[in-house]
Image: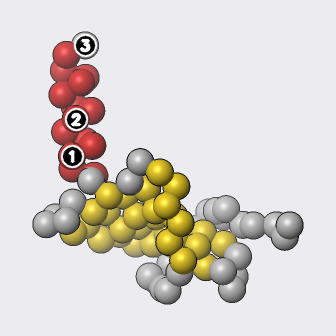
Amino acid sequence: MDAVTILEKPQDLQWDYDEDADVLYLSIGDPRPAVGIDIGEGLVLRYDEAEQNVVGLTIIGLRTRLLKELALGARS
């Protein structure tokens, strides 16, 4: 199996939050076409097959997760 670059220190990290869909898109560098790999629990890794490296991460349900964790923390 070839080596896969997981993440080098990015020079440019961009993000976009879709409030209606409650989804956060993180891109390393400019957003670009990539394969989405569902890694579970609402996380989708964006992978550039040609360059063999991770180019982003999508977090589904960010606000929902945050509010749930804050509510759990308040009960402690």
Indicate the quadrant containing the C terminus: top left, top right, bottom left or bottom right.
top left
Residue at 19 percent across and 39 percent down: it is 67
Alpha carbon distance from label 3 to label 2:
13 Å
Q: Which of marks 1 and 3 is nearer the N terminus?
A: 1
Label 3 crowd bin: few (<14), some (14–19), many (20+), radius 10 Å = few
Q: Position of residue 30 (x, y in %)?
A: 46, 83
Q: What residue type is labelled 2?
A: Lys
Residue where numbered disc 2 is placed? 68
Q: In this view, does 6 lie above or below 42?
A: below
Residue where numbered disc 3 is placed? 76
Q: Which of marks 3 and 2 is nearer the N terminus?
A: 2
Q: Which amino acid does label 3 sit on?
A: Ser
Residue at 41 percent across and 48 percent down: it is 41
Q: Which of label 1 and label 3 is nearer to you? A: 1
Alpha carbon distance from label 1 to label 3:
19 Å
Residue where numbered disc 1 is placed? 64
Image marks 2 and 1: residues in contact by CB distance under 8 Å = yes
Residue at 50 percent across and 72 percent down: it is 36
Taking depth in this image into account, of 42 and 12 the one nearest to the observer is: 42
User: Viewed as shown, does residue 47 lie left or right of 72?
Assistant: right
